[in-house]
Image (spheres, rainbow, N blue to C red):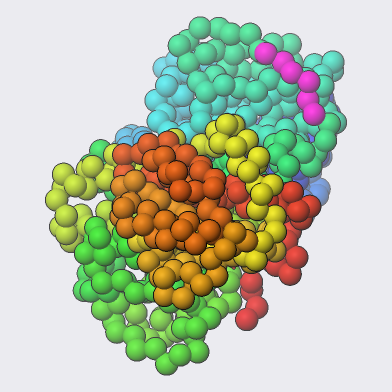
Amino acid sequence: MCGIVGYLGEKNSKKILLDGLKELEYRGYDSAGIAVLQNGEFSNYKAVGKLVNLEEKTKNYETKGFAVGIGHTRWATHGKPTELNAHPHLGESSYVVHNGIIENYAELKKELINNGTVFLSQTDTEVIVHQFEKNLQTAQTAFDAFSQTISELDGAYAVLLVTASEPDTIFFAKHGSPMLVGVNDENEKYFASSDTPLIGHCTNVNYFEDGDFGYVTSDEMMIMAQDGTKKEAIFSKLTQNKLSAQKDGYRFFMEKEIYEQSDVIADTLMGRVGDEEIIFDELDSNLFDGINEIKLCACGTSYHAAMSASYLFERYSKIKTSLEIASEFRYRSPIMSKDTLFVVISQSGETADTLETLKMAKNAGLKTLVICNVDNSSMVRLADACILTRAGIEKGVASTKAFATQVTVFWMMSLYIAKLRKSISDADISKQVSLLREIPTHVKVSDEMHERIKRLSKRYLHGHGFFFIGRDIFYPLALEGALKLKEISYLHAEGYPSGEMKHGPIALADPELFTIALLPEHLHYEKSKSNVEELSARDSTICAISSREFDKADDFIKIPTCKDYMLEFFEMMIVVQILSLEISIRLGNDVDMPRNLAKSVTVE
Ligand code: AGP
């Protein structure tokens, strides 16, 4: 997740901006930069990698007296992590920083280039500052030019812009990406994309709402609402607890990341879901030329996402799909054929086993694709092609939003390939595309659901084990639910195909065996229901998750009625994530840093 800071005042702007960016490091980034305007002169510094590199570059630079300044930490989504792609981005005499994704950047960029604008970066952000300066040529004031520019942007953004034509002003706009402004009794203004950089500097803050835009000077804060009417700032007291602020007030990063899934999946979808088809700008469509099989290879949660994908690829893309656990694949003598697209899935892009299999596939001459969350990782640098999941940094060791965005990417990919192969009708693709758009609403955590799960979790703190059972694509979700529980509660749990229970495991059925049964309404409901009834008849303690009432369970968690099994998948994903979280919290475990585990397994 990128970070934004801004400052207007008399103090040491460089230090305030750099300190503010340090407070945002926890959000993850791969490059950073600042721009300061003082006495009509700009100073701009950028660096790839950690903030120490930016500090090194600015060590001989000092600001004294009044200045306006902006800063940014970048998590690459469009364009590699390079200095040129780092923010702030320069026009002629203006700089901009931006969080979010400008969906219509390509058409804006094309028009600007046709009018002679020269772009330096591959980013979507750079169009903002060039569009502003184009509008500045005809507008009455810089604010008119800024307002015009903001009205021309589609997508999600939090923007700060400074320009030599208004050297005592910072322009701002917020839509779909968080930003706030802080004040104190020294006529200073502080901006940031989350609370922590303002702690210790400001007493009161205003959290901008979607559609807000305007400007600040030393003695003015002008806020316009989306409808163009002027609005007053609504100030609230700023928390003074930095760690709580980093967790946005949640108890654990994992909890925050479960709640973030709706927003990050909106980012994952941004710019990729057309009216009737899926668009992957980052892929050459010839990647699939001559491909008759997809082999998916990963570890842990990423393997569960890969397994989920295998159902979608065979069902919609009608392409043979095989699955590999990386640590097994690398020590077999696998037969690899060049008509196989080798796809590795990894949140970190650094998992040793998965990375080795990628090298094996490349050495065997296969085309390779990585689905990853970290743009400058080893796997991204090595693979022929990459699709970024855009989940932002995932700090909880137990993966949640990374899994959710991986499955989202795979659902999109199955339709992208279906279009290329004409494997299903355009009408069916269009129907699936419209269902995809609904994922963010189906991963919003409702307070009522969370409270319900929190209450019933007290019954699942002991017993001789858990089975999570599901059929079809709900089998990998059952595996994922079991892994989540194991990882953070240290209770034993297994994911199992519902239809397999009678082939042995049902011998374990008794009141101390807890079965979490996934019962989607739109996929094999009756078969799954009878599997659960077999267990219920043998007195296993059952927690059923379904949109349909089910009276044979000891506990029943009702999810909203959905139009499709894939939306039920995401609803049930939230339930199993929250269930493992609440059981772990009741057991007093460190949810974010479970014993024996590391966030990225970079050794064998
Ligand atoms: C999942 O909650 C775990 N953190 C672990 O299984 C993880 O998914 C696995 O180590 C793979 O990591 P990667 O996605 O970064 O390759």
Is residue 77 visible to us here?
no
- Residue 216 left/right relative to 336: right
In the rendered picture of this protein, how many numbered marks are placed on residues? 0
Q: Is 309 in front, or is 216?
A: 309
Q: Please identify the dominant SS of the magenta region.
A: loop
- Identified at 80% across, 29% down, the residue is 239
Q: Determine the quadrant in which ligand 1 lies.
A: bottom right
Image quadrant in which the N terminus is located: top right
Examine the rendered structure and indicate whether residue 53 appears above or below residue 172. Answer: below
- What stretch of residues is rendered in magenta? 234-239
10 is within the stretch colored magenta? no
Query: Where is residue 490, by image quadrant?
Result: bottom right
Q: Is residue 235 above or below residue 535?
A: above
Residue at 82% x, 21% y is 203
| Location of residue 212 in the rendering, given as x and y in whole percent from the top left corner | 54, 19
Q: Which of the 4 quarters of the picture holds residue 217? A: top right
Horizontal arrangement in the rendering, residue 5 relative to residue 77 (left or right)? right
Name the residue at 42% across, 66% down. Answer: 497
Q: Nearer the viewer, residue 490 or 430?
A: 490
* Residue 529 makes an appearance in the image: yes
The image position of residue 342, as x and y in percent, is 37, 74
Q: Which x, y percent locates residue 287?
A: 29, 67
Q: Residue at x 70, y 67 (%)?
A: 597
